Image (spheres, rainbow, N blue to C red):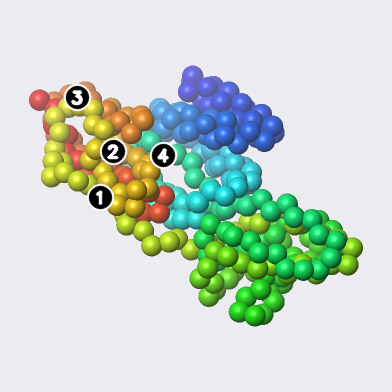
Amino acid sequence: MKEVEEFISQYSKAQVYLQDNDTARASQKYKELLQLYNQIQLLGTEEDKQIAHEQLCKLYYQIQEKPKSFVPYYAAAIFILLASFIILVEPSIVGLQIFPETIYQDIQVTTQRSGFINVTLTGAPTGLKIKATGTGKIYLVKDKNLVKAWEGGSDYECIDTCTLDGINTNKIVLLIETSTGIKLEKIKYTSKPTPNKAPYWTTETTTYKTPFTLNLNNVFKDEDGDELVYIASRAPGVFVQIYNNMLNVVAEEKGTYSISVYASDLKDVTRQPLTIIAE
């Protein structure tokens, strides 16, 4: 099956990009693999589907482990969970993109003595891990108490900061305790979503005659001004494609069909059913 061969080829290229720490190109390959995965789900054998699914999930988590600095994706995990539910209910989905589930922030502070460090995150943390080198301890200052986060681990370490409650600010204070020196490299954390207004459908029209092309940016709006991401379900006998926010729909035969378009601002998801008529 040519789609399987192409999937393997593109997957290999993504692995090369990951080895070179080129996350942007690896992410682009992930998106291309999603399109191939959709085709394999329609035409491949059960073994093909299982292997493609396993490799796609593996690549997704490999990309998440690559550091991403100062990117406000603190609520992207919510969208991923909802999108996963959508896929279970409607397994044929187009337009899905990749989103990180954790925030990585570069710090790169070296100190030879104990002291406090002020750090500004993108949101109030609900869990926090620290990657550092050297000898000593690192604490999070919380309500005038010291919560131990790191004590010499070689990878990300959280000790007592793996889960955090009651922090309502994105500005945190860390205490470094050392006598020989510590280099604080990175912080990995989850964060509370800020108040958000979900995208909404702006027109009364929900019935369209095929073939048609629809600019989804003209029919979905977001009051917060967030950039929207779109996915859409397929229906038997209907070609559905999303490219650059444009929805293209063509029916193979006469009839009435139903699809759904989902708009997300990476915090909330809005589902809009559409009726497709082919005369």
Give coordinates of residue 51: x percent, y percent: 54, 35
Task: Look at the numbered disc 1 and give the secondary structure of its residue.
Answer: strand
> Where does the image place residue 120, in percent across and percent down from the top left?
59, 60
Q: Is residue 145 above or below residue 151?
A: below
Q: Which mark is residue 211?
A: 3
Q: Identify the secondary structure beneath mark 3.
A: loop
Report if the CB atoms under discs 4 and 2 are less than 8 Å apart: no
Locate residue 148 relative to residue 163 in the image: left or right: right
Report the residue at 54% width, 72% height from top.
167
Query: Which residue type does callout 4 highlight?
Result: Leu
Element class at badge 2: helix
Q: Mark 4 or mark 2, which has the lower sequence index?
A: 4
Quadrant of residue 252 within the rendered picture: top left
Image coordinates of residue 243 in percent, x first then y, are 36, 29
First in residue order: circle 4 vs circle 3:
4
Identify the amino acid type marked 3: Pro
Residue bearing mark 2: 217
Task: Looking at this view, name the residue that lies furthest to the top.
Answer: 2
> Mark 1 or 3, which is nearer the eye?
1
Q: Position of residue 179 (x, y in %)?
A: 88, 67
Residue at 69% over, 53% down: 107
Q: Which residue is mark 1?
A: 200
Amino acid tagged 2: Asn
Kind of residue at disc 1? Tyr
First in sequence: mark 2 vs mark 1: 1
Give above or below for 101 relative to 209: below
Please tell me which of labels 1 and 4 falls first in the chain.
4
